[in-house]
Image (cartoon, rainbow, N blue to C red):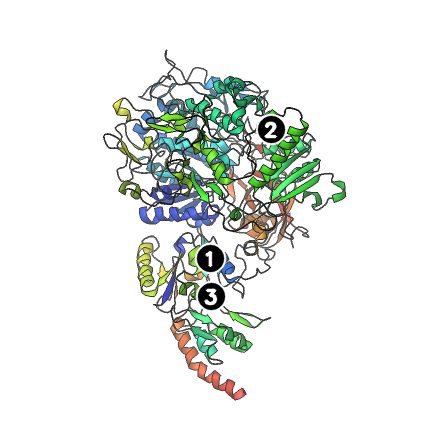
Amino acid sequence: MTNHWIDIKNTDCALIMGSNAAEHHPICFKWVMKAREERGATIIHVDPKFSRTSARSDFHVPLRSGTDIAFLGGMIKYIIDKEKYFKEYVTEYTNASFIVGDKFGFKDGLFSGFDKKLSTYDKKAWAFAVDANGVPKRDKTLKNPKCVFQLLKKHYSRYDLKNVSAITGVSEKNLLKVYETYAATGQKDKAGTVMYALGWTQHTVGVQNIRTSAIVQLLLGNIGVAGGGINALRGEPNVQGSTDHCILYHILPGYHSVPRAHWPTLADYQKANTPISNDPLSANWWQNRPKYVVSLLKSWFGEAATPENDFGYSWVPKGDTPKGLVQGDYSHLHIFDRMYKGKIKGGSIWAHNPAQSIPNTTKVRKAMDNLDWLYISEIHQNETTDFWHRPGVNPKDIKTEVFLFPACHRVEKEGSISNSGRWVLWHYKAAEPAGESKSMGETMVEIMNAVRKLYREEGGVFPEPIVNLNWPSHFDADQIAKECNGFFLKDTTIKDKTYKAGSLVPSFANLADDGSTSSRNWLYTGSYTEEAGNKMKNRDLSQTDLQAKIGLFPGYSWCWPVNRRVLYNRASVDLNGKPWDPTRVVIEWDGSKWIGDVPDGGWPPMATGKGKYPFIMQKEGHGALYGPGREEGPFSEHYEPIETPVKKHPFSKQLSNPCAKIIESDMDKRATPGDSKYPIVLTTYSLTEHWCGGGETRNVPSLLEAEPQLYVEMSEELAKEKGIKNGDGVIVESARGRVEAVAMVTMRMTPFKIQGKTVHEIGMPFAFGWTTPGVGDATNRLCVSAGDPNTSIPEYKACCVNLKKADKLTELS
Amino acid sequence: MSKTFLIDVTRCTACRGCQVACKEWQGFAANKTTQIGWGSHQNPPDLNPKNFKIVRFQEHKIGDTVTWNFMSDQCRHCLQPPCKDMADGYMQGAVVFDEATGAVVYTDKAKQLPKEAFDEMKSACPYDIPRRDDATGIINKCDMCYERVAAGLIPMCAKACPTSAITFGDREKMLEEAKKRLAVVKKDYPEAQLIDAEEVRVIYLITDKPEFYHKNLVAQGPAGISRMAALAKMTAPLKRSVRNLLG
């Protein structure tokens, strides 16, 4: 989230899209409700299904899964045509005025620079035009036909109401209703918030869904302000923390690229990943990256990391150089595909149930049969721990040796948890671990110590990364938290204060690239200091009057970065440092200093001439209406899901994302576009009562009682067409699999009128698996192995299926 | 000082925190539930001896507009509870008022009531609340977590509610709050109303027709709960004498 949970109460309009917030983030609805009750905010829910979120919204608008860009593209056109955008904000704080270089082009769904053979773009074709100093050229009148604003206007001019309605299935009346209501937040004293979750990310256009919302929010001046922002609603088990600390294949802790084979030395890596801005007004914060990366290497390799050995950079695994779609991709889709193809022999799985939660699950389960060994740390047995005796296989035929380490529950251990609003909270142990269970941290430290012992005693190929690790003898959450913050490694004087070697670094501004500091994650530097101790334990509710007005609690927990509660908050003020909305002040320049929240950099306002542009994480310092960093283009474009009920769409001849990552194998069958065998759209989701794949919550009797079995929500019209009654057992089939579910026939699902034809959509939860008897088995057996080109997140939210009434049920009882 | 709940459906997201928290607090085992032949989020389908609280779901469509109504159902803790009158006809002390809260509490003695007494209690209840475990003879329903309240806590359902749809407090204050909320909600929903506020300790604020939530949201009977209670009182001595007669 750019903002935080409480801040939602400050909004005038919440656009909940790609999220079922009330069901999946129940607590957040407290703040949504407050905005509605106390500010008269309008709550809009745009989603294929009428859910518990819709029930508490002012209105619900159903749209066909996978057409969010078309929907929002229409909103961009509306905002521009009706001049609803916030002109001063757009001109000063976004890159609307930037001139794009001559190589940029867009024709029939493809941008310039496309390499058809590799299905990738040469992004250099999208670069800005620069002046003699290397600073992007600008036209603040926004009239230059090559300026971002004009290109944006032209690009989305195709997204008229008729085209958008025809492909999304949303009536023109409903489109206008949302556009008018939301665009009204473009006034400088109004704020609109976007709340999204996996309903946006889990598409082959996932990142561009969010990019499109960023364009909307920047046009309306809704970023940086209270009650605004783009708010990714992240989950309870530390999803934010795990992203920050890199439980992802493509980044290292603190959002640094994973090293690649074509960056053999640290200098190569730093050069490739450190942006240079020639504009003195741009803070270009990532220019500091080398300090964070060297501090990270020092935290990993300790004294073994020296300037002479590149601080151990050569010991960090290097990903292959991406060439095309597959190479260098270590996401789940590719891991299990490689496993299926016999290229992976063993591994470990922690708190994760891929045999339930990865698309085309039948293949995933079969892939695991190819492993020689596997160790798993889990609380409960689930479809992954028990894959070797799943229905239809004989355990004798499975060669894999499986080790199961009993893990303790999260209430049985202490540590930090980072919430969606980037607040890092210390989480206390409530009970001792049951039986022989241990925290996963403890288990991991012990296993690695055994491996290190073997390497030290027996040697091995390339032992350095293992024996040189700065690794503890036992797991201690408090110590790890300190290491995340980081230490001075030599005596250091800052202003008039001297920090002895081994003392905690007070701020990431003090991290260095010469090996004199360590930090496991620069964003967390400042969370645990000599002066204030463990700030994650802070529970102080005091606030200034200004802070009280918008619900800021700077003394409660600690928030990255530097306890800043609203990101990009320098965009909430005008060039003189005065808030756009004096009733909802995030920060304000009082003539000598900023008051309110921690500002995004302490420089004075822009008008003083000593300021910096507000979007400090962008090289050019401006909000990116035009975003040349993404894989499939600097603007978003509507592409159909990989499995789609249509053969064409109104915007171009390019049916689906040209850069989508698609897995190919004999088990990865797909329906053709508009396939009459699979005419129904399936979307999948979680539900309030179960957590993700259900591995934990199916073991909680009162939750299983409340949601006992796999169901399929379908419209009354579809049920009638198929001769299905509420409560009937049905078979849902895709090109990849067959799943039993119970029909939930409901007026909350709506058939769509798409390009003149009726298209049905159904929805199924993915929480039910065979290890809980009679509840049904993995919905993900139906889903398609295709992913977003930027993140490789699979397209769980849209694929094509058919369904029929079941003659008999074997998975449900 | 007596207590009252306000259940404001405009704030309810049907997360079922109340249902699950109630069950966990009471320590009840789960019922075996199924979607087969049922196909609804409302599980278990009805109140039962192991669920003092369930959230009811009803969906409606008028024109193009879908509404999905949620009702966190439980004992209303009537000021004049017909079930108590019925039970008293058989045995004093099976159903009592908790003095501190005004809660209507079924004591351990209720187990000794015969099945026919339960049948009378159930049919006398204007909201169809009491349930009996035929295996053990236990008759039960929500007890307002009166022991928690005595310890200075609020009932578990109100504690678990993330959106303040269920609030709990001193009766006078809650009545005032209910009226205040009604006035606010009426601006958006002119049909909004408080249900049987003067007669029960669990006041629902609803925005749609009562039958769009549950057939027993409003006291059933020609003149509502007062009449039901009066009738119960009138017939109770008769039943008692009949019972005495039967020995």
Q: Is residue B64 visible?
A: no
Q: Which residue is mark 1?
A: B18
Amino acid, disc 1:
Cys
Q: Which mark is residue B142?
A: 3
Residue lying farthest top? Answer: A132
Q: Position of residue A591 (x, y in %)?
A: 23, 30
Instruction: Find residue A432 and report its horizontal and vertical position in percent.
Output: 54, 50
Closer to the chain start, of discs 1 and 3, is 1
Residue marked by disc 2: A466
Q: Secondary structure at mark 1?
A: helix
- Check the image and name the residue furthest to the left: A591
Distance (Cα) linking label 1 and label 3? 12 Å
Q: Percent x, y for residue B72?
A: 45, 59
- Residue at 54% across, 77% down: B112
Q: CA distance from mark 3 to mark 2?
A: 59 Å
Asked if marks 3 and 2 fall on the same chain, the answer is no
Crowding near the residue tagged with mark 1, few <14, some 14–19, many ≥20 C-alpha atoms within 10 Å: many
Let me know if residue A598 appears in the view: yes
Give the answer, above or below, for where A307 lies relative to B25.
Answer: above
Do the residues marked 1 and 2 share a common chain?
A: no
